[in-house]
Image (cartoon, helix red, strand yellow):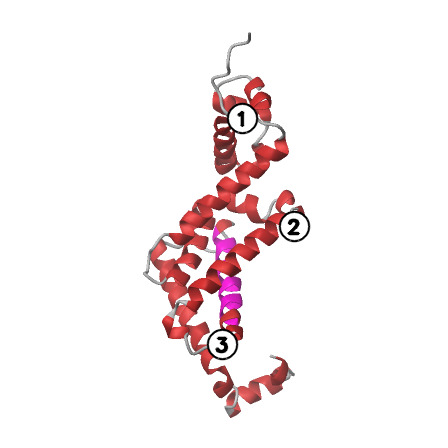
Amino acid sequence: MPAKSKYQAQDVIDAAFQIVRTHGVEKCSARAIAGEMKSSTMPIYSCIKSMKELEEAIVKKAIDLLIQYQIQERTGISVLDMGIGYILFAKNEKQLFRMLFFTEAAQKDMDLSKRMRDYAISVSMDKLDKFSPLDELSYKQKMDILYKMWTFNHGIAVMLNNAIIEDLSEDQIIRILMDTGLYIMTGVRDRDELYKQDVVRELFNRAGLNREHS
C-alpha cells in the first residue's frame, strides 16, 4: 500500500496562489508550484484533478481577498469603502488584479467577468440603498452614480496598478474618492436644474450635443 501523501489540495492551491501573487499568472507552472512546495510535481497531479480546477481555485482565492479589501471599514461610509478597497487591492496586489482583469484568460472567461460585474453591482447598489443622504434619489439616479463612480474608481485602479500615475497613499485615495463621490452625487441630484442654466446650455450647444440624450 503506497504511503499517503503529506500534501493536500489546499497546499497546492496555496503554493500556486503565492506564485501568482508574487510573480504573475504566467509564471505559475507545475514545476514552479513544486518548487514552492519543495516537492516533486507528483503531489500536484495527485491532489488536483486538472489545471483548470487549479486556475478556478486561484481566481476564487483572489476574489475572496478583493472582497476582504472592499468590506474593510476605513471611512464609515460603506459604499465609499468599497471603492477605496478596490483601488488599494489594485495598488497592493498588482499581479492578482492583473490576473482578474487583464490576462488573456480573464478576457476569454466571460463567466468570470459577469460574476465580477454582477457582484459589484449587487453589493454596491445595496450599499447605496442604505446610504441615507441618497434616499430622495430614484433607482435610475443611483445607478447613474454607481456607473460613474465605478468608471472613475477603475481608472484610478488601473493607472496605479501600471504606475501610470505617481503612487498614492491610502489617505490620498480616500480624499480623492470622497471629493469625487461628492461631486458625482451632487451632480446627479442637481443635474436637471444645472442643465437649465444658460452657461450649461451654451456648453452643450458648442459641443454639438443634444441635452435630451445626455
Residue 167 in view, yes or no:
no
Residue with the mark numbered 2: 110
- Taking the spot 44% from the left edge, 59% from the top edge, the residue there is 83
Tag 1: amino acid: Ile
From this viewpoint, which residue is outermost toward the top? 1
Which residue has dot 3 on it?
138
Q: Main SS of the magenta segment?
A: helix
Looking at marks 2 and 3 on the same chain, the residue that comes earlier in the sequence is marked by: 2
Q: Is residue 181 above or below residue 9?
A: below
Q: Are marks 2 and 1 in contact (CB under 8 Å)?
A: no
Helix, strand or loop for disc 3: loop
Task: Quote the CA–CA distance across marks 2 and 1.
Answer: 27 Å
- Please state which amino acid type lies under the numbered disc 2: Met
Callout 2: 10 Å neighbours few (<14), some, many (20+)?
Answer: few
Task: Choose mark 2 or mark 3, whichever is in front.
Answer: 3
Q: Position of residue 146 (x, y in %)?
A: 50, 66
How far, Cα to Cα, is label 3 from label 1? 51 Å
Distance from Cα at disc 2 to Cα at disc 3: 30 Å
Instruction: Read off the residue under disc 1.
Output: 33
Q: Bounds of the magenta span?
A: 144-160
